[in-house]
Image (spheres, grey):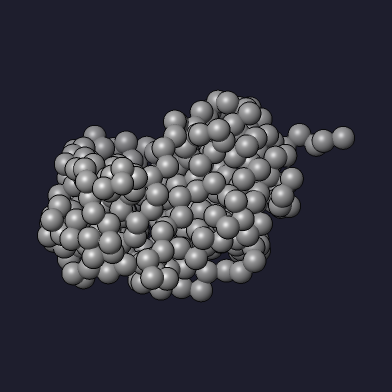
Amino acid sequence: MKDSAFNFQTLHPDTIMNALFEQGIRVDSGLTPLNSFENRVYQFQDEDRKRYVVKFYRPCRWSAQQIEEEHRFAQALYEDEVPLAAPLSFDGNTLLHYQGFMFAVFPSLGGRQYETDNIDQMEWVGRYLGRIHQIGRRSLFQSRPTIGLDEYLWQPRALFEDSAMIPKSLKPAFLTATDALINEVTHHWSDDVELLRLHGDCHPGNILWRDGPLFVDLDDARNGPAVQDIWMLLNGDKAEQRMQLETIIEAYEEFSTFDTREIALIEPLRGMRIVYYLAWIMRRWDDPAFPRNFPWLLEEDFWLRQTAIFTEQVRVLREPPLQLVPMY
């Protein structure tokens, strides 16, 4: 993504402040960068001491139509009182443009870290996921993609094949492990599930806590099975994950029905994410932020570990999936 990396190098503080000034916002503080590799995100205060977050979208990733779909979904959730940061509207537009960049402005909503071992918080998150999916079922995204094997497995596989980043001596074993993982995921994958609009990246880092959960970052929103927004909240051994899953689903079903057949997709989805995430880093390598933050990608030990991780996921996929304890 050379064009994207180059364009981000032209995103200077003056450019950001001029873009905001054009929308009637005067920055009265410095621009504090927030943790985001995919986009460029900054927090600031205006002259009235109100705090905002501005997100400049990575060029060439999403089209304007795809970002606007995300925004409409966020606004629908916000209007239904789901706690999340929805983009602000300026003259009826949430997606703004300046010097070739697309950007959006959000209210700055602080909170503390979601506690992954807190059952009460887990129940709250389950209820709100049920509400998010209740709205997500009303219609599907038309421009945004649907989670599937091609984007998450076969496209990364082609990237791995052509990449010079993987040491030549280790590439055959790595590709063999990749192929084994792809084959195993494909064997367990099913398209016979209900699709709906998802948060898409609902891991604990995208949930803040402030008198309840606050969902952030719909940047990966897409169509897919409901379990995609649940499995990344599970952690620990199988017994712990089973208890967490039961807690989340029981709360979730206060608002939405959950098809328990989707539990069998948890490990296939995990395998898909492992492959997709690695390919994502490799695709972004021309962005200086990536070599700086992922320097180990150039080390042989990293590729040995990745081969082992892929192989281990194959083993996990061959085990029986999680089973919920029947409720009587």
* Residue 216, position as x, y percentages in the image: 45, 47
| Residue 270, percent from left and from top | 49, 46
Q: Left or right: 92 with respect to 259? A: left
As rendered, which of 276 and 126 lies closer to the eye?
Answer: 126
Quadrant of the image occupied by residue 95: bottom left
Q: Residue at x 50, y 34 (%)?
A: 209
How many labels were placed on the picture? Answer: 0
Residue 65: horizontal and vertical position, in percent?
Answer: 41, 73
Regarding residue 26, the answer to whether it shows in the image is yes
Q: Considering the image in quadrants, where does the C terminus appear?
A: top right
| Relative vertical location of residue 227 with respect to residue 72 in this rendering, above or below | above
Q: Quadrant of residue 87?
A: bottom left
Q: Is residue 305 left or right of residue 267?
A: left
Residue 58 visible to an observer of this rendering: no
Q: Residue furthest right?
A: 328
Q: Nearer the viewer, residue 60 or 35?
A: 35
Location of the N terminus by quadrant is: bottom left
Residue beneath the point at 66% across and 43% down: 127
Residue beneath the point at 61% across and 55% down: 80
Q: Is residue 296 left or right of residue 91?
A: left
Q: In front here: 149 or 2?
A: 2
Residue 52, image x and y in percent? 34, 48
Please tell me whether residue 59 is drawn above or below residue 27 in the rendered image.
below
